[in-house]
Amino acid sequence: MVESLARDLVCIDCGAVSPLGYRLECDKCRGLLELRYDLDRLRAKGPALFAGPGLWRYAAVLPVGDAAHRVTLGEGGTPLLECPRLARQLGVRRLLLKYDGSNPTGTVKDRTSATAVGAALQFGYTATSVVSSGNAGSSIAAYSARAGLRSLIFAYERASAPKLLHMSATASDLIIYKGVYDDLITLWDRLVEERLFFDCGASRNPYKHEGKKTLAYEIAEQSGWAPPDVVVAPVAVGETFIATARGFRELRDAGLIARLPRMVAAQATRANAIARAFRDGTAITPIKIGYTVAEGLAAGSPGRKGDWVLRLLREHDGLAADAEDQEILDAQRLVARAEGIWAGPTGVATVAVLKRLLEGRQLDPAQTICAIISETGLKTEAALPSREGTAFDLDSLRRLVVERLSGRGRPG
């Protein structure tokens, strides 16, 4: 069994160190906590510490010590795809897409669900809970079911039908809430303090947060330990961005990679509190949001993790930008037609933002750029194409085929 190298918890604000345990904030200053590992051992052993497939290949740098608590549905190990046609259309030399829509529930959230539910078992909880706009709810529900735990899933009333169907199938308790994520999360967080259930939300729990760090480990390993120059990550509260950035930092500090990629935070314009603050050089001002097609990015008040994202952007030469809903939908069609990747709007917001930044000459097109595609399009609710059919005989079928292929070349 691969043991966990997790050593302790460190406050990102005051630097106070706490022993490993179920803590959501610093005892001294109430700052957020991050897990710290024995990177000297990682440096000494190197990739030899990594064994097996998927997310738990990196069990040594994850915080679930007992292999019996390492809940899995086969998450992780997702493809890092070379996308030459899309690169040409965007005008960039080399483009990689890290496609996390191939995870078991079709979303990057499966990475954090694995460590969240594993930690719930580790700390003796029998119930989990999360407030979700869709993907987190279906993912936590599925992993909780896999672990034999009860799940209280609070789902956004405007979540897409496929996500609601998935949640209703896997959650032990599905509760639909009115309003948006920001309206409920503050109340729900107060119940977290009462320890009624294990916190599977994105706001504070370092154990839940940790699973997405494996994005960096996979991208680095799949790139031969020479990661891309730029990595574009989707940002709502900021969990994916922070965890990925931390993963790259650990790899550099352990000597497995020589440099850090430049991190770009991608938001939807209708929920762009972090990108706006970055652009204006100010602190984050929460914004009241309505609906955005990128449901998973629908957070107007990202809280302390939003502040953490902003700090990382400013300290490490990061970049933040946003894209309008129509640009996101255009990117969804572009990625599908150019590369055959059917991703949801939340998933392709990174590509929409990347397109904007390249057009604005804010990124160097000669660099290697990786965009994280965080969800499949198979959980998207959208208008169907026409179902009106045509009856064919052989001649009419031949005419249609020849007409459609005309000018596009024929096989020799």
Image (spheres, rainbow, N blue to C red):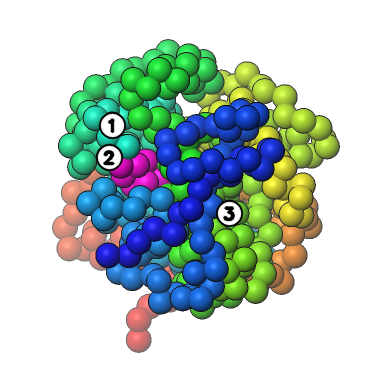
Q: Residue shown at 66%/55% (left/top)?
A: 263
* Residue position for label 1: 125
Question: In the image, what residue type sits under mark 1?
Answer: Tyr
Q: Quadrant of residue 254?
A: bottom right
Q: What's the magenta region?
A: 111-122
Of the residues under marks 3 and 1, which one precedes in the sequence?
A: 1
Percent x, y for residue 49? 40, 71
- Label 3 neighbour load within 10 Å: few <14, some 14-19, many 20+: many
Q: Which mark is residue 121?
A: 2
Percent x, y for residue 7? 48, 53
Q: Which mark is residue 246?
A: 3
Question: In the image, what residue type sits under mark 2?
Answer: Leu
- The extreme right residue here reads 281
Determine contact: label 1, label 2, CB under 8 Å: yes
For the residue labelled by badge 2, is the local secondary structure a helix, a strand or a loop?
Answer: helix
**Structural distance between the alpha carbons of marks 3 and 2:** 24 Å
Q: For residue 114: magenta?
A: yes
**Relative to 290, is 82 above or below?**
below
**Relative to 169, is 253 above or below?**
below
